[in-house]
Image (cartoon, coloured by chain):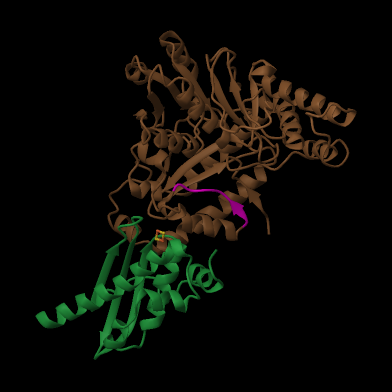
Amino acid sequence: MYSEKVMDHFMNPRNVGEIEDAAGVGEVGNAKCGDIMRIYLDVEGDIIKDVKFKTFGCGAAVATSSMVTEMVKGKTIEEALKITNKSVADALDGLPPAKMHCSNLAADALHEAIKNYQEKMQNA
Amino acid sequence: MRRVYLDHSATTPVDPEVAELMMTYYTEKYGNPSSVHSFGRETKAALENARESVANLMNAEPTEITFTSGGTEADNLAIFGVAEAYSKKGKHIITSAVEHNAVIDTCEFLAKNGYELTILPVDEEGFISVDDVAKAIRPDTILITIMHANNEVGTIQPIAEIGKIAKEKDVIFHVDAVQSFGKIPVDVKAMNVDLMTVSSHKIYGPKGVGALYIRRGVRVIPRVHGGGQERKRRSGTENTPGIIGFGKACELAAQRMAQDAEREAALRDKLLEGIMERIDYVKLNGPRGENRLPGNLNVSIQFIEGEALLLSLDLMGIAASSGSACTSGSLDPSHVLLAMGLSHEIAHGSLRFSFGRQNTEEDVDYVLEQLPKIVERLRMMSPLYDQVKHSKTQKANAL
Ligand code: FES
């Protein structure tokens, strides 16, 4: 039911882990099925230098988290903000309809992390 | 790669002896049992023989067996059939929170159409209280429908005690015995059951065949009208190869039941102990001991999600199932686990292994070799697990 890309990212997830003293952290819970995803960002200048994730969820949730980290690494904040759940799902060659909400989780966690970073910057 | 099938509660392979017999009834003895000629007569004889085998395995009379297309149809026939036949007496139905969807959804459909439903709760091991059943019975109660053994957690309900109460209060009692029939002793007389659903493909028979036991004297309005087969209770040309295969599967089950149960329970216990030794934060779902189906194991592995577990196991050739929300189309966790009071999170990491005749010690060893690695990999990714790792004061397997 999953594409090869999804299975690849599920079995060999990129950027699993945490960043200590991260520039931004975003955590979202999935109201639908109760899953949790956390994304850590390391930002230098305007560039996302490093990104890590932790996910408690299904295969699609792990794969979308992994994919989203791969998509934003080295990108500017502005570019990262343009990433949507659809672009993540497309990058994985699609997700089964019942699993589209899992890709929301990844995009939302990323946007939360960026928001957290921006708030920190304002307060600094 | 090794392939280990541990999903026998979902379905079983057809026994080769069964398949061989069935083949004859596809290619050689294909007559319609309703026909008067010799072709029809030989099929009719085999059909009645199968009816007897099914009846014998539950201590019923052959005339009390109605063949259907499976457990779901038998459940529907029982519940709708009684609801319609006895609607003058009342419209109240009692069921439980852990029934199969074939029962729950049918009851809920009736509840939307003028019937009243009482759904009994279960305790943390999945047991219904006999007292609760007694208290729920009203003058207008026409049906109690409770499963024998639960498909997810293997809990075996006190059917004989409930049957006794139903009889005393003169309420019709239907039992969905799809998971228990052929695996543990089932006796409709001793259990005071009026209607009982059984299925073929859970006991090494073919898919697409089931039966409803209807105690003599109990009225059931048919759902399928037509040629009047099955004593007018279920019209349509009989699925003779399937039914004959089901009959054979019942004969084999009668011979093997005790030895299968013992062997499967031993394998199950070995797997449970092995998991508990090798993995921390694991919870057994459902009871221990005699009141659990011999081949059923259900554990929750905390901090990880069931679908991810199933996918990883599948990649290693291991087939199991899960009650996680992420594995269900509706994205709701298993209603059985929730009814037992488990949190969404624990239901999330639930894993069911169901054993069968072909499983071996080596299968268990293989799972015990693979599962801890998979759990570790997924926990490494889980934001919930580091919280626990960081608070070292928590005790492992404290649940
Ligand atoms: S995270 Fe639950 S379905 Fe994907």
Q: Residue at x 30, y 48 (%)?
A: B394
Magenta residue check for A53: no
| Spot occupied by residue B281 in the image (x, y as percentages of width and height) | 39, 47
Chain painted green: A
Looking at the image, residue B102 lies above or below residue B251: below
The residue sitting at the front extreme is B226
Which residue is at the front of the view, A3 or A77?
A3
Q: Quadrant of residue B235?
A: top right
| Spot occupied by residue A17 in the image (x, y as percentages of width and height) | 37, 70
Is A59 left, or right, of B269 in this rendering?
left
Looking at the image, residue B105 lies above or below residue B388: above
Which quadrant contains ligand 1? Answer: bottom left
The residue sitting at the bottom extreme is A45
Instruction: Write the start and end of the magenta stretch as one range.
Output: B317-323
Does residue B281 show up? no
Decide whether the magenta segment is chiefly helix, strand or loop: loop
